Image (tube, grey):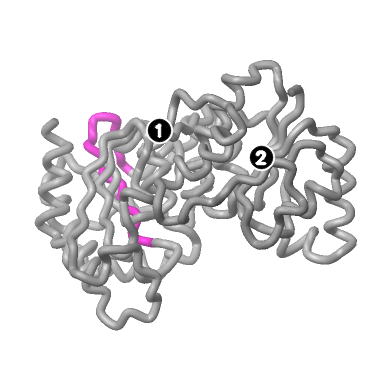
Amino acid sequence: MNRILVVNVNWLGDVIFSSPVFKALKDHYPQAKISCLAAPRVREVLESIPAVDEIIIYDEEGEHKNFWGKLKLIGVLSKKHFDAAFLLHRSLTRALLVFLAGIPRRIGYDTKNRSIFLTRRIKAPSVDSLHRVDYYLNVLESFGIPVRDRVTSLAVSPTAESEIHSILKSLGVDEKDYVVVIHPGGNWNLKRWPPANFNLLISQLTRDPRVKVIITGAESDKGLADEITASLARKPVNLAGNISLRQLIALAQRADCMVSADSGPLHIASSVGTPVVGIFGPTDPGITGPRGSGRSVILRYDVGCNRKPCYYSQCPDNICMQAVSVQKVLDAVEQIKNS
């Protein structure tokens, strides 16, 4: 095959989990051009996956929301003459798009009544029975493509690396400082560690003058970062809402350790080889835990209701996250620091 399309998933962490898919395809078809159809929000992560040769944006909330937008996208896909499409996304609409684009081989999970649009229908395992990396790689393996590497990996842009170096230098972060990046946000509240815990954690970490703490987050996390830092005597460097995703990847590589709940930035850090402390509660690290080359210390406690992944977003007390104490996180950071 000379031209391959991968129809990717929508969320940052899941796209990182898909990175071994592209490596396996490139290993098996070294001469092929590998394109990826994905949402705009994950473009910068895809640009950091070396085996992705082309990114085609599917903006289902904007440009491609209506019938005419989808028709235009079908035309774009059709003109590229792909030999095959591997669908990691379970969407019926995406299966219809690649069918109408005339892509002759269409491989994906037989979900959402879309079997008519697939030429290779794969029986879907339970979503919570495999790690996401293995769930996506299973699409390739079911087609007979061997997989030799299941480790997530991201490349750092030299430009972003230079930009982060300059930003940190201007904020008083020296090359010899021990940098702990803290990402307090998450795409849903149930996965978030309490702000008071982050406040106490930063207070304890910054007692050591050699440690510099940096807070990251999206624009929407600015209020959370301000809440965490308001009462601190020694303020951390607060970059929430102030750096790009590409720069976040470079910052994660510069860090000596990252502390985060189950989030995209946690998986970014792991995927650039940085040690991470992952605070897990409702989600299962066996399904969505870090799979990069960076060392992982995972903190998660059985509180009864989280023995299976929990999606009860209206949970009144979030006891699974509160079960992870500040001291346990401090001990984990110290363990990484001294290793």
Residue wearing tag 2 = 86
Q: Is residue 181 left or right of residue 223?
A: left
- Please tell me which residue is depicted at 29% across the width and 83% down the height of the picture: 316
Image location of residue 87, percent across then percent down: 65, 45
Placement of the N terminus among the 4 image quadrants: top right
The amino acid pointed to by label 1 is: Val
Categorize mark 2 by other alpha carbons within 10 Å: few (<14), some (14-19), many (20+).
many
User: Disc 2 on helix, strand or loop?
Assistant: strand
The amino acid pointed to by label 2 is: Phe
**Which contiguous range is marked in magenta?**
172-185
| Residue 229 in sight | no
Placement of the C terminus among the 4 image quadrants: top left
User: Quick check: is 144 in the magenta stretch?
Assistant: no
Q: Is residue 325 left or right of residue 10?
A: left
| Residue 316 in sight | yes
- Please tell me which residue is depicted at 31% across the width and 41% down the height of the picture: 172
Image location of residue 218, percent across then percent down: 47, 58
Q: Earlier in the sequence, mark 2 or mark 1?
A: 2
Query: What label does residue 137 carry, if any?
Result: none
Residue wearing tag 1 = 272
